[in-house]
Image (cartoon, coloured by chain):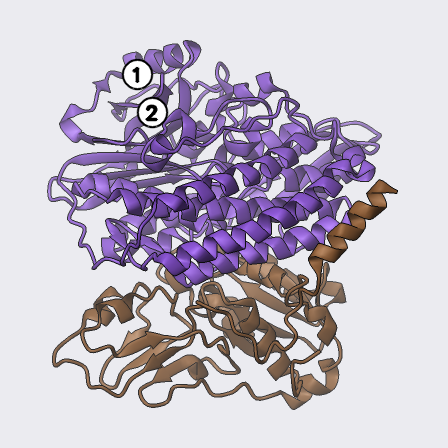
Chain colours: A brown, B purple
Amino acid sequence: MEHFIDAFKVRQSQGKQFVPDVRAANPVGFRGLPLISNTPCESGCTQCVDDCPTSAIKLSPFSLDLGKCVFCDECARVCPSQKVAFTAGYRLASRTRDGLVVREGNNELTPVEASERIRKIFGRSLKLRSVSAGGCNGCELEINAIANVNFDIGRYGIEIVASPRHSDGVILSGPISANMAAALELCYEGIPEPKFVIAVGACAISGGVFEDSVALDRKFLGRFAPELYVAGCPPHPLSIVNGLLDLLGHADGRW
Amino acid sequence: MTNANVLISKRTDIPTLSYEDFRSKVLDDVKSGSRLVSYFATPVESRPEEIGALQCVMINSGKLEYFRCVVNSDLEYRQLTSELPAFHCFEREIHEQYGLEMPGHPWLKPIRFEGRWLKRMDEYPFYNLAGKEVHEVGVGPIHAGVIEPGHFRFMCFGETVEHLEIHLGYQHRGVEKMLTKTPIRKLSPLIESIAGDSAVAYSLGFCRAMEALCGLKVADEIETIRGIAIELERIAMHLVGLGGIATDVAFLPGSSTYGRLRTAIINLSMRLCGSRFGRSWFRPGELRFPFLQSHREDIRKTLAQFQSDIAIINKLFQESRSVQHRLRTTGIVPPELADEIGLVGIASRSSGLKRDTRSELASGVYKKHPIEMITEPDGDCWARGIVRLREIDVSLDWILKVVETLADVEGGPRVDCIPQPDRRAISIEEGWRGEVIHYLATNGQGELTEYKVQDPSLRNWFGLAQAVKNNAIYDFPICNKSFDLSYCGNDL
C-alpha cells in the first residue's frame, strides 16, 4: 500500500510535462536564430571572420551559414558594430543546404516547405533510425530528448526505431568519421524504399568543427542528399521537432 | 598560488630520466601507492610520426607529479602491462600511434583505429573461445537506441557471457591532430565537441591548462561560477544515467521522471549561458555571460523545486523490488580488480575506491567549499546507480551553498591567450564520468606543438568488459548503462 502511495506521489509531482504547442514554445535564454542588422560593417574590419571557429561567415555582403555555425556567440561578441545578435528563435531547419544561410535584411530562414511526396507516404507515421557517425553525444542526447515526456514526438506519429528494417529513413548526427562510413552505408541500404536522410547538427550538415579533419569520409551525403537539415550545435529539440512537422505538412503543433 | 589540479613547468625543469630510471620509477611509484593518471608518448618536434618521449603523470600524496624520458630510435621497450594491467590502454595507444614494439604485451589490440589503422575496422583481432557449445553474439557498431557507435562481441556459454570484447574506433575524428593545428582562439568549440556530454568538463580543463601556459589569473567568483556549471553538468548527466538504468529495467516512472528532471537542469544552464550543454560558457581567462541577482534567484528556485521532486522518485526507485532485483549483484567489479585495472571516476567510486580529484587535488572553489566524496562498496550496477543518486544530492546542496557567496558578476571582455615558450601544462578536471586530462606543450616560439586529451572512458571500458564476465547476456544493457562510457571520448 505504501509503495502504491509513493507511486501516486511520483505521478502527482510529474503533473503535465509536455510542451502543449511546439510551434509556440518559449525556450528562455536559448541562443538560436541570429538577426543580422543592416548597419554597415566598419571598413576593413574582419574580426568576426577571423574568429569564427567554422568559417561560417562571409563579408560584403554579410552572410552567416547556420549549417556551419556552432552558435558560440563569438561573432556577436567581437563585432564593433553589433552586426549580429542571437535570438531565442528555434525554427532552424531547411529543405536545402543554401536555405540555412542568413543574410543582411532577410532575417528569417525560408520556412520549410512540406514535401508532398513525403507527406503523402509518411504524414501520419514516420519511423526513423538514428545513426551517429562521429557525433559527440550532444546531438544524440537531443535526438533522444525529442521522444521524452517534454517534447513527445510520439503524439505526432513520429518514432525513433531500433532497426533499419522498421524505419523510413536515417536521422544522421556527427561529421561521418571514416571508420563509420561503411556501417552508415550498410544501415541505409537496409532500409526499405521509399526512404530519405535527415541531417541533424552542424557536424552532419557540414562537418562542423571537424570539417578539416582527415579522419572523415562524407561521400555518403554526396550520393544521398538530405531532405531536411536541422541547424544547431547541438540543435534544440524544438528545432528538430518543428523541422519534422514542417516536412510532414502538419498544420499546427498543438495537442 | 598554484592550483593542485594544474601543473605548469618549464621544459628545462621537467625531471627527464634515462629509460631504465624512468621505467623503475614508474614501477616503484605505483607499487608504493602513487596513483597513475596518465602515461603517453609525444613525438619528435619536427616529425609527428616519430616517438620522441614517454611521459608519465601520477598523483603522489595529494600532489600531481610529472616526469618523462627521451626516447631514442634504438630503444628496446619493455612493456609494463603484464606487471601492472592498468597500463594496458596507454601502451596500446602508444603502440598504435607510433608503432613502438611491445614484446610480450598480453592485450596489444588497436585502441581507436587511427592513423595507418584508419578504415581497417574489420581487422580487429578478436579473442577466440572454442567449444561445441560456445556461441558468439555480435552487436553494433550501430545500436538499437540513440547512442554512439561501437562493436561488442560476446563469447557465450549458454546465456552466460564468458568473455566480452569491446571493439571501438568508429567515432575517431582525428581530434588530437586537429588540436595543434587549430588557432588557440578557435580551440574551445572543438574541445567542447570531444565528448559533448562533458562539454563543461573539457572546456574547463582546457581553460585551466591554457591559463597556466599564459600566466593568466582568474577571479575567485569566476571559479565559483565554473564550479556551479560543472556541478549542473554532473547532475544532468547523472539523471541521464539513472533514466537509462530505469528504462533498461523497465521501471517506467523512473525513466520518465528522471528524464523530465534533467530537462529542468539543462534548461537552467541554458538560461545562464544560452546552451543546454553549457557550451561556450567559458573561455580561458574569461567569463562570457553575466551572473546576476536574477540568475542566483533562478538557481535557488529551480533547485528547490527539483530537490523536492527528485526525493519522491528516488524513494520509489530505491524501494522498488524489481529495480533492486535487477541491479543488485549484477555486473560486479570488486575493489581489488577496479584498482588493478585502473578504473577512475564514478566507476571506481562505485567499487569503493577513493578517486575523486575534486577531493584528492582540491583546489579553487572546491578547496574553499569542500565537496563530499561518495563511494559505495559493492561494485555492482546498484552501486553505480546509487553513487549517481547520492552525488546529485551532494552537488545540489553544494551549489545552493556556494551560490550564496556570490555577488553580481558582469561578463568580462575578451582575453587574448599568449602562451609562454617552452612550457608544459597538465590539468585534471573531475567531470561527471571521471577525470578529464589535458596536456599542452609549447615550443621555443610559444606555439602549441603538443596536445593530448584523455577521457576517463579510455581506462573504464575494460572495466565494463570485466563487469559483464559470468553475467547473463541479457544483463549487458544494464551493465553498459551503469558505466555509461563515452565512445568518442575513447576514439577522439
Residue that numbered label 1 is attached to: B22
Residue B53 image position (x, y, % from top left):
27, 28
What element does badge 1 sit on? helix
Q: Amino acid at mark 1?
A: Phe
Tags 2 and 1 in contact by the CB under 8 Å rule? yes
Q: In the displayed structure, does residue B487 sit left or right of residue B95?
A: right
Quadrant (top left, top right, bottom left, bottom right) of the N terminus of chain A: top right
Q: Which residue is mark 2?
A: B56
Residue in the image at 38% along x and 49% along y: B175
The C terminus of chain A - image quarter = bottom right
Closest to the camera, between mark 2 and mark 1, is 2
Q: Chain of mark 2?
A: B
Q: Residue B50 falls in which quadrant of the image? A: top left
Task: Tell me if residue B361 can be seen.
Answer: yes
Most foreground residue, B142 or B387 = B387
Taking the spot 67% from the left edge, 75% from the top edge, the residue there is A195
The residue that appears at 66% across and 74% down in the rendered structure is A20
- Horizontal side of B117 relative to B219 (left or right) equals right
